[in-house]
Amino acid sequence: MNKDDFEEYKKMAESGDAVKQFELGMMYHDGEGVPQDHAEAVRWYQKAADQGDARAQNNLGLVYDNGIGVPQDYSEAVKWYRLSAEQGCAYAQFNLGLMYSNGRGVPQDHAEAVRWYQKAADQGDARAQNNLGLVYDNGIGAPRDHAEAVKWYRLSAEQGYADAQYNLGLMCIKGRGVPQSDAEAVKWYQKAAEQGHATSQCNLGGMYSNGRGVPQSDAEAVKWYRLSAEQGCAYAQFNLGLMYDDGRGVPQSDAEAVKWYRLSAEQGCVDAQCNLVVISEKNKSYFG
């Protein structure tokens, strides 16, 4: 957008066009075509929200929720999420559900959280569908129902939501709400892992390490453990340490094993802490 176009755009916003006010707020928020300015973004969101623009109301909720351009204020966030959610904005319905789940700006109320997640999930919001799956999986805010959990995880996972893909993989490997299937678990772990989901990467490494649902491959196991470990997953760090300790899929290396055990141990992994004691007896030079 050139300067003349921007000035015309701003003029329309200043004349009271709520859509342009919201879009101008987005431009300042993202620094798109203008220098990023969160305070200015809030100013334009507020103008649009005051006219009843549901998207602006949701975004105003987000800035108060996260303290971006304004002091953090959960009660104010809830106010704006609610105004937007009551107009049917799925994003706001999900966000309001989160506030009830976590007791932020409102008393914690899992049943009320479920009510808002359901509204958003029925509109196809993948995050709400995943959270609704978690509700039924764990029986928090609704009776536990693994089949219902799988239903919502699948709807979310099929939209590409990595958390839901991971959760669906867990249901498949445990046979909760679906017939047990290592191959199906691998399928969903793989989809999430390819999006960078660290726990899925770790679990996928475990499937390759043990030949469950895929041909056994130490090299593939190491590949996925490493990707997960580099994101800080303690269990993946422990498993990568094991691979170096045993020389599986990588050349045996006490130094590399110690490196990964230590990272895992520092996060409280007891198995890694124990293996550090064992490996220290083999080679004192890594400890001091």
Image: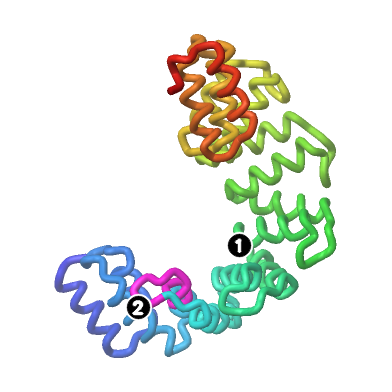
Identified by mark 1, the residue type is Asp
Displayed quadrant of residue 9: bottom left
SS at circle 1: loop
- Residue placed most toward the observer, 45 or 250: 250
Q: In which quadrant will I find the C terminus?
A: top left
In this figure, which residue is indicated by the disc labeled 1?
A: 125
Residue 57 left/right relative to 159: left
Mark 1 closeness class: few <14, some 14–19, many ≥20 residues within 10 Å = many
Q: Which residues are magenta?
A: 60-71
CB atoms at circles 1 and 2 under 8 Å apart? no
Q: In percent of the image, x 61 and y 57: which residue is there?
A: 126
Q: In percent of the image, x 23 and y 64: which residue is there?
A: 33
Q: Which mark is residue 42?
A: 2
SS at circle 2: helix
Q: Is residue 150 above or below residue 210?
A: below
Q: In percent of the image, x 54 and y 40: which residue is there?
A: 267
Q: Position of residue 43 (x, y in %)?
A: 32, 82
Mark 2 closeness class: few <14, some 14–19, many ≥20 residues within 10 Å = many
